[in-house]
Amino acid sequence: MLGVSHGAPLARAGQAVAIEIDGLGRLNTPLVAEGAAPSPVMPEMPVAMMPTQRSARVAFDGAVHTAVPHATGLQLDDGRVLREDQVVWLPPFEVGTIIALGLNYADHVKELAKELTVTTQDEPLVFLKGPGSLIGHRGHTRRPAGVAFMHYECELAVVIGRAARGVKAAEAMDFVAGYTVCNDYAVRDYLENWYRPNLRVKNRDGGTALGPWFVPVAEVPDPQALGLRTFVNGQVTQQGSTANMINGVAALIAYLSSFMTLQPGDVILTGTPDGVVNVDAGDEVACEITGIGRLVNTPAPDSAFGR
């Protein structure tokens, strides 16, 4: 969407708005006051049924497989047992809309306070990401040449299991299918104080690692009592707890579903605690969340991507 020309009038309930573009057609939209008429029921997105057990999605031998943990690595749906390094790991479920939270841990807000134009907010800072931003466990994320500070973000990823609209916080967890680990990289050089976060920082191709496992909600009694840790080349650089989220999982689902319908497969990236440090090409970055798993990823130079 390329923007609008000047002179657009305010629109009011009861009006019928028609928009025309030469050669493209006429778009008619009636406006009704909120609550005056029932909202249309939108069909759920055609995504696969969410898994009911801890599982992964991997590519091996020319096909995509569902896999489950095994003592020596993982077991494919056809029974074969493989090592982790024998497969290409994909995001562990079929992902719908990717909804990400910024500044959702108080200690991380304090960590970045000198860089922020505004450090308080009335509502969660939310933005969307495209499907091209995702890669799986053991994947490589491009670290652009010439940047001074690129950092990881260890995050709990919440997976929606059924359509949620106008959900109350007390009922929100009934709409969660499960969880996985996310590492959402950011290039700090590209952050601009007048717009946080901007597209070049948070929607980079392959900049968001997800996995390795989808963990069903039944295995996680309390998503607000999980430890988060990040290791860079084996050294602990980040530690935190989901107990320190400014907006918890239930509150986020209630907030988001108040203005948009969440669909099965949608994923909410819930933010990161303090402790982000610069990483360089070739570093091994491992993000761990208690009971969810360990997600390993490596920043790589431009040359690895033919640039």
Image (cartoon, rainbow, N blue to C red):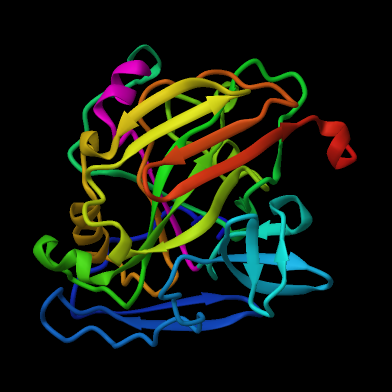
Can residue 74 be seen here? The reply is yes
Position of the C terminus, as image quadrant, is top right
Tell me the magenta residue range: 96-112
Image position of 187 (left or right of 223): right
Give the number of marks. 0
Q: Residue at coordinates 15% horizontally, 86% vertically from top-left?
A: 37
Identify which residue, 270 or 201, lies in the foreground.
270
Q: Position of residue 291 (x, y in %)?
A: 37, 49
Reply above or below: 159 against 275.
below
Reply above or below: 14 against 73.
below
Q: Position of residue 191 (x, y in %)?
A: 52, 27
Image position of 190 (left or right of 255): right
Residue, far front: 71
Q: Residue at coordinates 62% horizontally, 80% vertically from top-left?
A: 24
Identify which residue, 128 or 206, lies in the foreground.
206
Residue, far top: 114
Magenta region includes residue 60: no
Reply above or below: 281 against 222.
above
Can residue 276 be seen here? The reply is no
Position of the N terminus, as image quadrant, is bottom right
Q: Position of residue 247 (x, y in %)?
A: 21, 43
Q: Residue at coordinates 36% horizontally, 20% vertically from top-left?
A: 116
Reply above or below: 80 against 245.
below
Q: Position of residue 293 (x, y in %)?
A: 47, 48
